[in-house]
């Protein structure tokens, strides 16, 4: 490809990080930042030891205890489960040995890796960021190429700061129009996944553009890019604009003296006019109502005024059979309206919707209302910094007064790897990203939705159109 060929943003990021071509499809990619959690890193450190390898660039790696940590209120956190405690102590030991910065169990800034990294200015436009965690796509919100890797790759990255990488195909998702009041980035991304399917972006890095994307806040773009992986994508990108620049500069004081150079470099981080994408989709934001999943895959989703599908309306084959299986698991009859479904639990948090804007949206609904009888509702901030910011604004008091639990940060009931686990048959309105069978507890049922919708479910005891709730106020 010569220099005059118009390039996509994705291609520019790949080109600027290519150390060597390995063959026609694979390159050696330089990774500016490697994030680690306690769950997917232990074998990698064992591998390093077996081969007598070190970590040459420890400062370009950061580790976080996120998945297994208990979130009960209280100053000191103790991991009761022995296997989990061992994972955390191993991470601590390995980070100390190799000089890798760690947000440890009792660090005041601890939280979910994908919430922590951007809030401390570690994520900057033009970077390649990887992690042994699928939701690393989040960082595309700032024009950084982020994606998840496997454990063997974690070892390779620790040892070399590079990764053998197969270049992805490119997809453009253009969203124009204005999201209606009550609809958020969560609804937008659920609607996208609902239309293109859970494998709809498989093998692709998605670039989002259009007036509806321009209008999103950076935190909303995190939600969007975070969940794009649920369409099977290998990355998600939004070209950095003034909002992205402001977000990063406000959190990365070290950049101040290089501000002019950074701005000039970031300016080039956009797809050239005439750049060709392998696949393109278009959406009209004005048609996107609040969304709720009804099944066990994020693409089994409907608008809040919609219904569980009738199997006969679905194409015969895998789509119909997986819908039938999902309805049976979720204990929902075919054709049932989504709104009005009783819930017993509400979970507000995760790397998708555990940031301050999400908590503000949920608190806006909770304020002056009460969690419905028979419902247990919890709010788990995405990080210590989010928790502190929320408390400074008094959001904790809003939630507590309404009967929500106000927890310490962590992944928590997003995937129930700690002790926040739902019992069989419990139905949960959740701001998370995956509604797989058993994810929040064996036999538990997850309905994905945005934070205000989850809060509306908490105060009414059923899946509720938040727009109607606000009318009733
Ligand atoms: C535990 C980790 C490997 C996993 C991921 O890759 O996403 C988890 O974070 C999840 O959300 O399912
Ligand atoms: S919050 Fe959920 S999706 Fe995000 S990293 Fe943790 S477990 Fe994975």
Image (cartoon, helix red, strand yellow):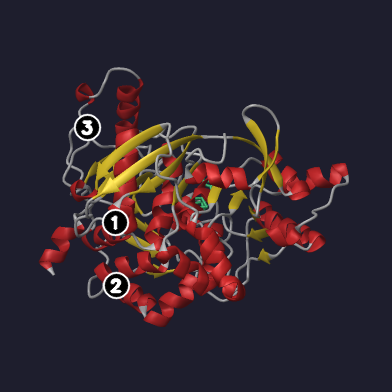
Can you tell which of label 3 and label 1 is closer to the viewer?
A: 1
x, y (%) of residue 164? 68, 37
Q: Is residue 465 left or right of residue 215?
A: left
| Quadrant housing the N terminus | top right
**Which structural element holds mark 1?**
loop
- The part of the image, by quadrant, that contains residue 392 is bottom left
The answer to which of 368 and 138 lies nearer the viewer is 138
Disc nearer the start of the sequence (3/1): 1
Which quadrant of the structure image shows residue 100?
Answer: bottom right
Mark 3, Cα crowd under 10 Å, few <14 / some 14-19 / many 20+, is many
The quadrant in which the C terminus is found is: bottom left
Identify residue for label 2: 402
Disc 3 residue: CB within 8 Å of ligand 1: no
The residue beneath circle 1 is 184
Residue matched to label 3: 309
Give the foreground label among 3 and 2.
3
Pick whichever, 3 or 106, lies toward us: 3
Q: Residue at x 13, y 59 (%)?
A: 468
Q: Confirm whether residue 127 shows in the render.
A: yes
């Amino acid at each position: 490809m010569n220099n005059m060929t118009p390039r996509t943003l994705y291609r520019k990021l790949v080109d600027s990080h290519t150390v060597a071509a390995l063959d026609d499809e694979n390159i050696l990619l330089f990774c500016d930042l490697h994030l680690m959690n306690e769950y997917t890193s232990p074998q990698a450190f064992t591998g390093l030891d077996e081969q007598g390898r070190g970590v040459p660039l420890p400062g370009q790696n950061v580790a976080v205890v996120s998945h297994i940590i208990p979130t009960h209120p209280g100053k000191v956190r103790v991991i009761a489960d022995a296997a989990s405690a061992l994972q955390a102590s191993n991470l601590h030991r390995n980070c100390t040995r190799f000089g890798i910065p760690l947000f440890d169990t009792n660090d005041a800034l601890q939280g979910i890796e994908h919430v922590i990294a951007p809030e401390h200015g570690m994520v900057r436009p033009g970077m390649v960021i990887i992690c042994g965690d699928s939701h690393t796509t989040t960082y595309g919100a700032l024009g950084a190429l982020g994606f998840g890797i496997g454990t063997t790759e974690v070892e390779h990255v620790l040892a070399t700061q590079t990764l053998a990488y197969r270049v992805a195909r490119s997809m453009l998702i253009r969203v124009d129009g204005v999201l209606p009041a009550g609809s958020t980035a969560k609804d937008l991304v659920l609607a996208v996944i609902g239309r293109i399917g859970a494998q709809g972006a498989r093998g692709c890095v998605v670039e989002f553009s259009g007036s509806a994307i321009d209008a999103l806040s950076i935190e909303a773009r995190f939600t969007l890019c975070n969940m794009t992986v649920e369409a099977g994508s290998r990355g998600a990108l939004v070209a950095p604009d003034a909002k992205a620049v402001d977000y990063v500069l406000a959190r990365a004081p070290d950049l101040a003296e290089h501000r002019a150079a950074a701005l000039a470099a970031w300016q080039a981080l956009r797809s050239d006019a005439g750049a060709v994408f392998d696949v393109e989709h278009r959406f009209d934001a004005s048609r996107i109502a609040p969304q709720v999943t009804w099944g066990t895959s994020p693409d089994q989703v409907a608008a809040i005024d919609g219904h569980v599908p009738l199997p006969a309306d679905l194409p015969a084959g895998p789509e119909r059979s997986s819908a039938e299986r999902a309805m049976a698991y979720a204990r929902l009859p075919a054709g049932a309206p989504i709104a009005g479904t009783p819930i017993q639990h509400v979970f507000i948090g995760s790397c998708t919707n555990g940031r301050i804007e999400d908590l503000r949206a949920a608190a806006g609904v909770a304020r002056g209302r009460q969690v419905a009888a028979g419902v247990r509702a919890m709010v788990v901030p995405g990080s210590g910094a989010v928790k502190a910011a929320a408390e400074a604004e008094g959001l904790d008091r809003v939630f507590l007064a309404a009967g929500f639990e106000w927890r310490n940060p962590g992944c928590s009931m997003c995937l129930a790897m700690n002790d926040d686990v739902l019992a069989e048959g419990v139905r949960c309105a959740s701001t998370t990203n995956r509604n797989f069978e058993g994810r929040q507890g064996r036999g538990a049922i997850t309905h994905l939705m945005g934070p205000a919708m989850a809060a509306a479910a908490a105060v009414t005891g059923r899946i509720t159109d938040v727009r109607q709730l606000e009318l009733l106020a």
